[in-house]
Amino acid sequence: MRLQVGMDLVVVADVQEAVHDHADRYLTRIFSSRELGDCLDAPPAITAERLAARFAAKEAAMKVLRAVSENGDEPLAWNTIEVVRSISGAPKLAFSGRAAEVARAAGVADVSVSLTHEREYAAAVVVAQVEPA
């Protein structure tokens, strides 16, 4: 077994700008309805921080999947990587579609995610346990 780590940092204002400029087109291309439900019920400043943290998690997960994949430069749809809440409220990742196929083929056995956000920045770290083929 080996560990693979991905990390990403996002400027919250960049996400706010994308939402402002592209509205639903941006939101539905990047985020699942479940993710939007977790984020959009907060005041606007917190909503942007939450969305930015989820965007960072998706980027960090893509870095992990590119590192372990045989075809590391293959693009993945943003919405095939989803940040969901466990029963305790802690974030976790769910892969679907092509992201799930890549993870399975690469031997990704388990994935953990940590999110953080504070005013101007949001960040995420993803750690994957990869089993040898």
Image: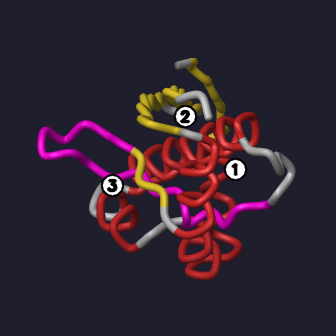
Residue span colored magenta: 75-92
Which is more N-terminal, label 3 or label 2? 3
Q: Which residue is mark 1?
A: 14
Q: Tags 1 and 2 in contact by the CB under 8 Å rule?
A: no
Q: Tags 3 and 1 in contact by the CB under 8 Å rule?
A: no
In-image side of 29 versus 75 (left or right): left
Tell me, yes or no, whether the highlighted magenta stretch contains residue 84: yes
Question: Residue 122 got which mark?
Answer: 2
At label 2, which amino acid type do we have? Answer: Ala
- Kindly state the secondary structure of the residue where label 1 is placed: helix
Q: Residue 16: horizontal and vertical position, in percent? A: 60, 56
**Can you say which quadrant of the picture contains the C terminus?**
top right
At label 1, which amino acid type do we have? Answer: Asp
Q: Tags 2 and 3 in contact by the CB under 8 Å rule?
A: no
In the foreground, 12 or 67 = 67
Q: Callout 3 environment at 10 Å: few (<14), some (14 to 19), or many (20+)?
A: few
